[in-house]
Image (spheres, rainbow, N blue to C red):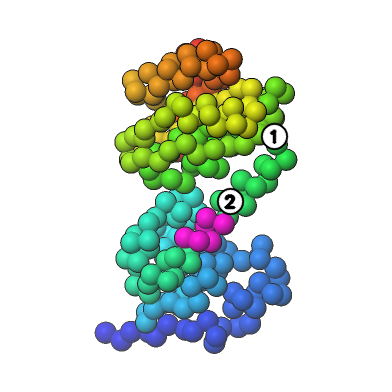
Amino acid sequence: MDKTPKTSIKNWAEDDQPREKLMNKGPAALSNAELIAILIGSGNSDESAVALCKRILNEVNDNLAELARLTLPDLQKYKGIGEAKAITIAAALELGRRRSTSVLSDKPTIKDSKTAFILFQKELGDLNYETFCVILLNRANKVLKTVKISDGGITGTVVDQRKVFKLALDNNATSIILGHNHPSGQVTPSQADIDLTKKLKTAGLTLDLPVLDHIIVGDGNYYSFADEGIM
């Protein structure tokens, strides 16, 4: 059976070439696939860079958050994506995550569990392993800093309460909010989550540094211990 050769990006109409399109129309005019195609530069013997990126994105429902969950080996399973290209894609997605986090550098005020969730989501939402973070607050409930305490595996992470409260005291925090993710997407707390929350709450009361809430981040959803009356 005859095989139609791929068409090189260089042979496309100028308006269809990602780099030229970006220069002439701005980055907002490009699709996700076109933006990633600029990063990898070339496709494979069967697909242009854009076609290859469209296929990869199609398999993650064109969801960049899902794409960010792919490991380097996952990306390298696609013909035409070697180690260097996989690293480039991962680096670009990480920059995007950090950019979205840096928008909050004006010290937002935590008004409710949803506000805390939005902040934790930016830190934890793309991770496929469990990570524990703490939001440090001043007396006006403004965010001083969000700190990663520990990384774990798919099913759990170890939290050192001494490290949590040392960071809080070193940064002159007057209260804290705990947060971690469940890579499974399920936000129901485990017994270990409940025990840890009680332990940290008790320690916080002793130090006059209250734990206001514990947020579990799932797949675009969250569980708030405070909202559920467990704090």
Q: Are marks 2 and 1 in contact (CB under 8 Å)?
A: no
Q: Which mark is residue 98?
A: 2
* Residue that carries the numbered disc 1 in the rendered image: 108
Check disc 2 and give the amino acid type.
Answer: Arg
Q: Which mark is residue 40?
A: none
**Residue drawn 40% across and 22% down?**
196
The N terminus - image quarter:
bottom left
Location of residue 102 in the rendering, given as x and y in whole percent from the top left corner: 65, 47
User: Is 194 colored magenta in this rendering?
Assistant: no
Mark 1 closeness class: few <14, some 14–19, many ≥20 residues within 10 Å: some
Mark 2 closeness class: few <14, some 14–19, many ≥20 residues within 10 Å: few
Whole-number angstrom distance, CA of label 2 to CA of label 1: 16 Å
**Residue drawn 52% across and 67% down?**
36
Q: Helix, strand or loop at disc 1?
A: loop
Check the image and report above or below for 187 versus 32. Answer: above
User: Is 91 colored magenta in this rendering?
Assistant: yes
Location of residue 231 in the rendering, given as x and y in whole percent from the top left corner: 50, 14
**Residue drawn 50% across and 24% down?**
214
Q: Please give the range of residues in magenta.
A: 90-95
Location of residue 99 in the rendering, given as x and y in whole percent from the top left corner: 62, 52
Q: Earlier in the sequence, mark 2 or mark 1?
A: 2
Check disc 1 and give the amino acid type.
Answer: Pro
Taking the image as shown, residue 96 lies to the left or right of residue 66, namely right
Location of residue 91 in the rendering, given as x and y in whole percent from the top left corner: 50, 61
